[in-house]
Image: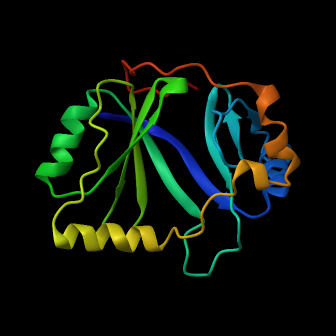
Amino acid sequence: MSLFWLDHVNIRTTKLDEMSAFYENVLDLKRGKRPSFEFGGAWHYCGKQAVVHLVESEKKFKTEEAQVEHFAFRSNGTVKAFQKKMRDTDTPYNVVPLTEINMIQVNVFDPDGNKIEIQFAASEADMEPFNGSPAARRRAKKGASLNVAGPMPLKKSKAKTSKTNKRLGVPAPITPPKKRNPPY
């Protein structure tokens, strides 16, 4: 397995409309297709790549909470091989299938508690999380404690941005990368 490129940054916000307008109007990252998540948000594109993922949060953050909720790498190889490496290195993880776009996400925390998402083209992923040793569980718990503000359920969202995502559509399914150059 190799990491091929930094795929996106995921930012939590209680100001979804304002943040989305900033990324679109100030930085020229156009809002575009996003999977049919059950929470509010927006994806902003640099060319063909969704590089900024905004997630609408239900409440304001404490200053010690992370607002950059995670960063993500696109990977080749198999989910099974990556999961084995995580077990062998006592690195807890959880798995999130996004079958709508042919993606499997494996989420881990680094030693400082930063959440990292590793993306794979969908395969026969082991959907069971791996909790690791007591020390590894403490590290994961620390990372999770920096990300306590949950996403805003789509049904509760008052943001115009969330209400209009459906008309933009869903991204095309992903395929495993063949070379290290990003797709944009």
Applied colour scheme: rainbow
Camera-nearest residue between 18 and 178: 18
Residue 43 location (% of width, % of height): 68, 40
- Identify the residue at image location x=56%, y=49%: 9
Viewer-proximal residue among 40 and 43: 40
What percent of the width, then of the height, locates residue 142?
37, 74
Give how far across and how far down residue 11 sits, in percent: 62, 56
Q: Position of residue 128 (x, y in %)?
A: 28, 45
| Number of dots carrying numbers | 0
- Judge from the rendering whether residue 87 lies leftward or rightward of residue 48; answer left or right: left
Q: Is residue 174 left or right of residue 41?
A: left
Whether residue 157 appears in this view of the structure is yes
Instruction: Check the image and name the residue furthest to the front.
Output: 155
| Residue 1 visible within the image | no
Whether residue 160 sits left or right of residue 124 in the image: it is right
Which quarter of the rendered picture does the C terminus lie within? Answer: top right
Residue at (71% x, 39% y) in the render: 44
**Residue 92 versus residue 128: which sits nearer the camera?**
128
Q: To which quarter of the image does residue 103 belong?
A: top left
Quadrant for the N terminus, please: top left
In the image as oriented, which residue stretches furthest toward the bottom?
63
40 versus 60 height, above or below: above
Position above or below: 114 against 169:
below
Q: What residue is shown at x 22% (from left), y 33% (from top)?
A: 80
Quadrant for residue 49, please give it. top right
**Which quadrant would residue 143 be assigned to in this image?**
bottom left
Horizontal relation, residue 149 to residue 23: left or right: left
